[in-house]
Amino acid sequence: MSPPDQQPEQGWDESGSLEALRELVTTGARVNHVVARRAGISDTELVTLEHLGREQIGPAEVARRLEVSTAAATGIVDRLVARGHVERRPHAADRRRTELVLTESGRGEVVGHLMPMFIALDRLDRSFTADERALVERYLRGAIEAFEQVLEPKDS
């Protein structure tokens, strides 16, 4: 936080909420690394499992989301398939394409390590009123938009 007699530089004044958000981001990155290590997979393999836990995508989309080459994405997928965490299946609408499907083993690898955190977060979430949750959600969605300015910078 800036001392009271100093002006924030370029519109940046680290309030308690901004400091907590920064700590959350740092801790979240550590959680991913620790979970990947415990599961015996790489950080990128864990991120791939997380993506597949939300939706079925193909290897090319894995490459795009991880910002790696298609060859690197193929290696990641190959390792996850070899471990039994992911299956390759023909795409339902376009047989020339491949879909990646998260197996129960893959889901268990992610969820099993993260369940204590999910339970604690659910307990915290339930401790807020509906209005408080709406305010927290508004703040977090705004933070996501701020992060996306780094991921996809706008031309000035």
Image (tube, rainbow, N blue to C red):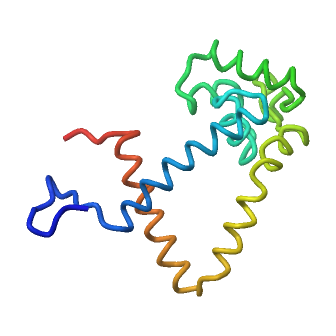
Residue 147, percent from left and from top: 40, 49
Q: Nearer the viewer, residue 97 or 14?
A: 14
Where, quadrant-wise, is the C terminus in this rendering? top left
Question: Eyeballing the image, is 89 above or below 29?
Answer: above
Q: Quadrant of residue 52?
A: top right
Q: Residue at x 84, y 38 (%)?
A: 106
Q: Nearer the viewer, residue 113 or 79?
A: 113
Q: Residue furthest top?
A: 71
Where, quadrant-wise, is the N terminus in this rendering? bottom left
Residue 32, percent from left and from top: 64, 41
Q: Quadrant of residue 128?
A: bottom right
Question: Eyeballing the image, is 67 above or below 154?
Answer: above
Q: Quadrant of residue 15?
A: bottom left
Q: Residue at x 72, y 61 (%)?
A: 118
Query: In this image, 112 relative to 147: left or right?
Result: right
Number of numbered callouts drawn:
0
Q: Nearer the viewer, residue 41 or 142?
A: 41
Query: In this image, 45 relative to 67: left or right?
Result: right
Residue 125, percent from left and from top: 64, 75
Question: Eyeballing the image, is 81 above or below 151?
Answer: above
Q: Nearer the viewer, residue 128 or 103?
A: 128
Question: Eyeballing the image, is 100 above or below 109?
Answer: above
Residue 3, percent from left and from top: 17, 64
